[in-house]
């Protein structure tokens, strides 16, 4: 039985269940094939009340050091770091103070594989652990590192300086393959998206929409407080639709549980994704699987599989409103999720990845 240590910047917390839920899903996927999986999710120390300013940090201050989540041992060591791409060298160096605590937590459990989900600021930390245990080292880029982080010269240099020990790099959309080529030979680059993790009982077919009613239930598929999700553009698009004669009911996701999220997908006629950047985004596949149409900005892998007339190539509420209307008119046959996003396909890709010599 191979042992896999996942090291990640994000992971679901008791009071923030949507945070990195795709990491937990991938851990479950590996466990289904008898991989022995442990998870380290380093937690940045945040000032009091900071979570009211940035909702991504809800649930951080009272998180336990060690948890068991759905049968997985999870370690949440805390350390000081600057946010985003501020002082990247300091962040990469400072997180290494967690190494001794991490080795103590692992005890005699020796990982065969270290899988990092992100580069910054966990690359040097993960690299050190892989060298200590002589483990294979893999990285998955979900979005921020290649959309934002890599624009920082110091983060870019850190990746260049520490790429030689990496056995494989995984990206979740076609756009990121060209960026990965700057640092890795093509044989080390893998396109392995996140799979959608929803039980068959929740599957719904998309039904024909009655345009004559001029009523739409629209879901904003994110927490409105997350700046990159661009909630202001969502609201402008809703107002534009109302000017065109549509009656709108709207809801949004807010650190919801998986069950609550699925209920909202079932409620909505359409999700409207107005993000400035995305890796996947996973919510688009989940929505279609649950019988909900999608209109969105051109982010992540959306252009690879969604109907082209439901995707806006400009961050304009006029354009997005038209995409909403077009999405409602589309033939039902256009709403198909490619097999590469299904769990069986992703598991096969991960298994092949881990067998690299």
Image: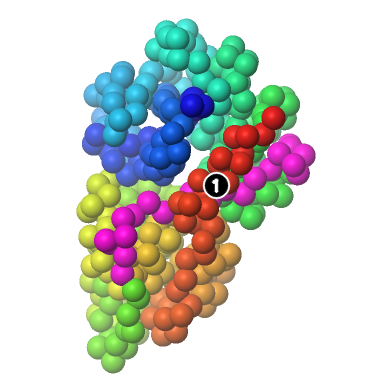
Look at the picture and state if 350 lies above or below 233: above
The one of 191 and 248 positioned closer to us in this rendering: 191
Look at the picture and state if 164 lies above or below 219: above
Q: Is any atom of residue 215 visible in this view?
A: yes
Residue 183 spot, x, y in % from top left: 73, 37
Q: Residue at x 34, y 24 (%)?
A: 73
Q: Quadrant of the C terminus?
A: top right
Residue denoted by label 1: 348
The one of 90 and 12 positioned closer to us in this rendering: 12
State the image quarter where residue 330 is shown. bottom left
The kind of secondary structure element at disc 1 is helix
Q: Along the horizontal axis of the image, is 77 left or right of 182?
A: left
Residue 136 spot, x, y in % from top left: 62, 25
Q: Along the horizontal axis of the image, is 334 left or right of 49?
A: right
Q: Is any atom of residue 9 visible in this view?
A: no
Q: What's the magenta region?
A: 182-204
């Amino acid at each position: 039985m191979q042992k896999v240590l996942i090291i990640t910047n994000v992971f679901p917390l008791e009071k923030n269940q949507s945070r990195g839920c795709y990491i937990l899903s991938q851990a479950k996927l590996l466990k289904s094939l008898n991989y022995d999986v442990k998870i380290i999710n380093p937690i940045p120390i945040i000032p009091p009340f900071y979570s009211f300013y940035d909702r991504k940090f809800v649930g951080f201050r009272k998180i336990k050091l060690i948890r068991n989540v759905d049968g997985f041992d999870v370690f949440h060591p805390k350390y000081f770091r600057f946010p985003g791409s501020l002082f990247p060298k300091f962040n990469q160096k400072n997180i290494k103070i967690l190494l001794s605590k991490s080795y103590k937590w692992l005890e005699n459990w020796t990982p065969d594989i270290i899988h990092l989900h992100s580069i910054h600021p966990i690359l040097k930390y993960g690299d050190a652990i892989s060298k200590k245990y002589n483990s294979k080292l893999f990285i998955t880029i979900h979005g921020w590192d290649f959309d934002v982080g890599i624009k920082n010269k110091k983060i870019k240099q850190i990746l260049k300086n520490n790429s030689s020990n990496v056995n494989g790099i995984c990206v979740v959309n076609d756009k990121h393959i060209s960026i990965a080529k700057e640092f890795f030979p093509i044989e080390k680059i893998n396109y392995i998206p996140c799979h959608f993790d929803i039980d068959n009982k929740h599957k719904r077919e998309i039904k024909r929409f009655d345009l004559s009613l001029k009523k739409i239930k629209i879901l904003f598929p994110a927490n409105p407080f997350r700046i990159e999700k661009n909630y202001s553009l969502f609201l402008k698009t809703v107002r534009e639709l109302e000017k065109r004669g549509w009656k709108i009911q709207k809801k949004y996701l807010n650190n919801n549980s998986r069950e609550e999220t699925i209920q909202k997908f079932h409620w909505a006629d359409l999700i409207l994704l107005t993000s400035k950047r995305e890796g996947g985004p996973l919510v688009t596949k989940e929505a279609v699987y649950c019988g909900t149409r999608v209109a969105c900005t051109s982010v992540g892998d959306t252009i690879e599989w969604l109907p082209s007339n439901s995707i806006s190539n400009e961050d304009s509420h006029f354009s997005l409103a038209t995409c909403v209307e077009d999405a409602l008119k589309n033939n039902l046959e256009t709403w198909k999720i490619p097999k590469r996003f299904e769990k069986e396909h992703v598991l096969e890709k991960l298994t092949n990845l881990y067998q690299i010599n």
